[in-house]
Image: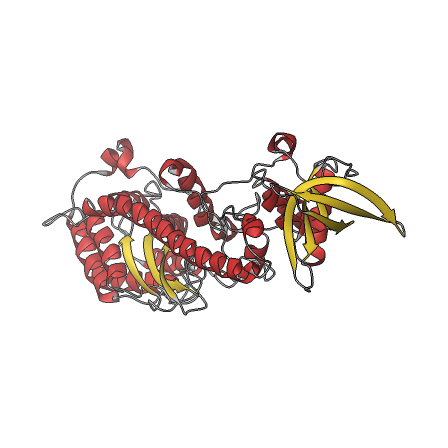
């Protein structure tokens, strides 16, 4: 739930309407310290355990005394002010009424925000980012296919996009596992106008899986069909093995036409990007459906130089091939973390530069800047835990190994907050009579709530968490883009 500005407006409005009025405007009334304490307490009541990140991390209380001291000093300065006059304020845009509604936040907008920023950043910096072998499988990123039909369609596009014209690719394609593999292959046949399923004729270049003589083992060969016959309704082929005089027999269903890259390339599909890694459900269980395991990704991703080496090895090479793919996947996973960390650090550096110009001005006598400095000091006093450690902040998916601590980068512009507060306390300045007091008080309280809420929308923090792997959690950082 967001900060409770509704109760803040009601309570602060009641307090203001009960204060004495000197002339047309006096927010503090007779007891400056009393109102300073009250406003500080109401601010903390509104945000403590209620203000949150878009991911559900709740605020943990800072040092309220810092607010009280700053507010008291500011209100005493306001009480002693004799200028500018009301007439001057009416002409000065710095004192213009602040009548903005309390900002509303669509949490759903932020659930994919980092992924979308990462996508844009990877495209912008694509020249310096080597392609991932295990790149995103679906052009729906950061979403995933809604049903099996969409999965089959998107997966067939992803697989077609990696066609390299080799016989090894075709053998790998024909060995896609399980019922899903058969459906994907059928969809690929549809998309390529059944170029793989056209009747074979003598003279066709083919690849085939054939039996090894006097053994239960099989091997893959490449060659030319030299003859075809039909036996009990099934076709039998004799294939002359490439670069040899060996002739081998092959059964229908085990023979694939060798497709030239020029024949097949017109059907190749372009996927979203090769610059973003395909994480597994294990790495990100909150967003990636359970079927997308590492094993799924390895089996349905063609890797040139590994999967097309069937013809160079015995069939037992499959086990070694899987291990090689696992090792490459692990290495690319690490590179994926490094890239995300780099983006977050770039974002953070931008706001760190703003923070360097955001320090309190020593000796300032501007009461509104003093109040703003107090608000920023309150948040800074929470140190490494201004918000709860759980849930993890994306792209982190777990709290360990770094523990869910925060590095505050930016708690908003002190100048902007001071200007909001200046306008807020001078909103409703034309209300002069006692019956108008309640209206004026509510108007001021609402403007104050807007000022504080708008300030929190500027917050930027780094979260220290991790991502799970089979070998244990690895460090990762997340990014908090707003607080509300």
Q: Could you tell whether 419 is left or right of 140 in the image? A: left
Q: How many marks?
A: 0
Q: Position of residue 225 (x, y in %)?
A: 73, 40
| Observer able to see residue 293 | no
In the rendered view, would you say 178 is above or below 273?
below
Q: Position of residue 27 (x, y in %)?
A: 28, 52
In this view, the residue farthest toward the right is 232
Q: Could you tell whether 342 is left or right of 254 in the image? A: left
In the rendered view, would you say 135 is above or below 94?
below
In this picture the colour scheme is secondary structure
User: Which of the 4 image quadrants contains residue 85?
Assistant: top left
Q: Residue at x 34, y 59 (%)?
A: 463
Q: Residue at x 16, y 51 (%)?
A: 77
Q: Position of residue 34 (x, y in %)?
A: 25, 64
Q: Residue at x 63, y 33 (%)?
A: 260
82 and 304: which is toward the camera: 304
24 and 63: which is toward the camera: 63
Q: Could you tell whether 135 is left or right of 292 in the image? A: left
Which quarter of the rendering shows the C terminus?
A: bottom left
């Amino acid at each position: 739930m967001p900060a409770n500005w509704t109760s803040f407006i009601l309570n602060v409005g009641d307090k203001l309407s009960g204060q004495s009025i000197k002339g047309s405007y006096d927010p503090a009334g007779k007891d400056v310290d009393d109102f300073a304490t009250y406003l500080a307490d109401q601010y903390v009541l509104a945000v403590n355990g209620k203000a949150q990140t878009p991911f559900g991390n709740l605020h943990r209380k800072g040092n309220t005394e810092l607010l009280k001291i700053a507010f008291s000093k500011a209100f005493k300065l306001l009480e002693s002010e004799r200028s500018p006059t009301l007439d001057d304020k009416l002409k000065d845009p710095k004192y213009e009424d602040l009548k903005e509604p309390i900002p509303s936040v669509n949490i759903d907008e932020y659930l994919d925000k980092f992924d979308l920023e990462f996508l844009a950043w990877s495209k912008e910096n694509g020249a310096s980012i080597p392609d991932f072998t295990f790149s995103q499988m679906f052009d729906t990123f950061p979403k995933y296919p809604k049903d099996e039909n969409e999965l089959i369609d998107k997966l067939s596009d992803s697989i077609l996009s990696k066609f390299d014209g080799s016989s090894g690719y075709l053998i790998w394609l024909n060995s896609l596992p399980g019922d899903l593999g058969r459906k994907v292959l059928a969809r690929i046949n549809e998309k390529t106008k059944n170029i793989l399923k056209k009747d074979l004729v003598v003279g066709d270049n083919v690849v085939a899986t054939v039996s090894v003589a006097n053994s239960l083992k099989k091997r893959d060969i490449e060659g030319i069909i030299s003859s075809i016959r039909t036996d009990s309704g099934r076709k039998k082929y004799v294939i002359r093995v490439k670069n040899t005089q060996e002739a081998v027999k092959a059964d229908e269903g085990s023979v694939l036409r060798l497709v030239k890259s020029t024949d097949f390339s017109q059907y190749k599909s372009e996927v979203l990007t090769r610059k973003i890694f395909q994480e597994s459900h294990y790495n990100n269980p909150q967003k990636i459906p359970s079927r997308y395991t590492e094993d799924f990704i390895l089996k349905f991703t063609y890797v040139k130089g590994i999967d097309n080496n069937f013809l160079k090895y015995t069939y037992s090479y499959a086990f070694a091939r899987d291990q090689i793919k696992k090792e490459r996947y692990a290495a690319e996973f690490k590179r994926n973390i490094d890239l995300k960390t780099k983006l977050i650090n770039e974002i953070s550096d931008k706001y760190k530069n703003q923070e360097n110009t955001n320090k309190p001005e020593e000796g300032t006598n501007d009461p509104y800047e003093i109040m703003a400095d107090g608000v920023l000091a309150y948040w800074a006093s929470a140190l490494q835990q201004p918000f709860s450690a759980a849930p993890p902040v994306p792209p982190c998916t777990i709290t360990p190994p770094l523990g869910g601590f925060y590095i505050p980068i930016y708690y908003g512009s002190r100048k902007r907050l001071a200007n909001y507060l200046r306008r807020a306390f001078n909103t409703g300045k034309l209300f002069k009579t006692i019956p108008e007091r309640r209206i004026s008080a509510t108007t001021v309280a609402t403007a104050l709530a807007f000022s504080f809420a708008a300030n929190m929308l500027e917050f930027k923090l780094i979260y220290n968490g991790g991502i799970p792997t089979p070998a244990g959690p690895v460090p990762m950082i997340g990014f908090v883009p707003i607080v509300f």
